[in-house]
Amino acid sequence: MPWRTRSRGQYIILRRALDPQSAWVAEEPDAGIVGFLSLQVPQDYVDHLFVDRDWRFCGVARGLLEVARQQATGPLSLDVDAENMGARRAYEALGWQVVASTSATGKARQMRLVSP
């Protein structure tokens, strides 16, 4: 991910993209930033959730989602690529459910999931 490099330009781009939202960063003392989540608070919609490959299945996403849930007024929702089976299994293991999906021609199909 370009945000992991110390590039000022990439930082500014990311900051502008996240500016109107709430965001949380997961940091490990020896590894640095290992994940982040951004949330559109009024809609309780998770815009971005990223966990470094080396830190997946270590509870980072669960922790970020729990912090976001504490800020939300209702269940969280997010969209996931239907072919991203790792993410889908992780969300399902946390009790998330598919509530809608798209079937766009030539594009990856997206699924809307909602938290318990």
Image (spheres, grey):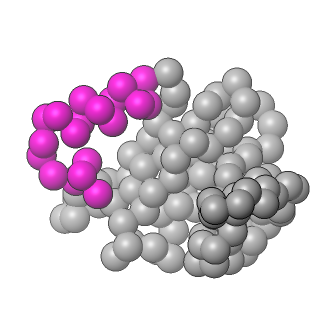
Q: Is residue 113 visible?
A: no
Where 11 falls versus 6 (above or below)? above
**Quarter containing the N terminus:** bottom left
Q: Residue at x 60, y 52 (%)?
A: 65
**In the image, residue 16 lies at what x, y percent?**
36, 25
**Quarter containing the C terminus:** bottom right
**In the image, residue 42 lies at what x, y percent?**
70, 24
Q: Toward which corner of the image does residue 93 lie, by quadrant?
A: bottom right
Left of 111 or right of it: where is 25? left
**In the image, residue 34 lies at what x, y percent?**
33, 60
Q: Toward which corner of the image does residue 80 lie, by quadrant?
A: bottom right
Q: Nearer the viewer, residue 40 or 64?
A: 40
Q: Is residue 51 visible?
A: yes
- Main SS of the magenta part reads helix
**Which residues lie in the magenta part?**
1-19
Where 15 falls versus 86 (above or below)? above
Q: Residue at x 41, y 31 (%)?
A: 17
Q: Residue at x 42, y 23 (%)?
A: 19
Is residue 12 shown in magenta? yes
Q: Nearer the viewer, residue 84 or 97?
A: 84
Q: Residue at x 80, y 44 (%)?
A: 75
**In the image, residue 50 lies at what x, y percent?**
45, 57
Q: Toward which corner of the image does residue 104 lie, by quadrant?
A: bottom right
Where 40 falls versus 94 (above or below)? above
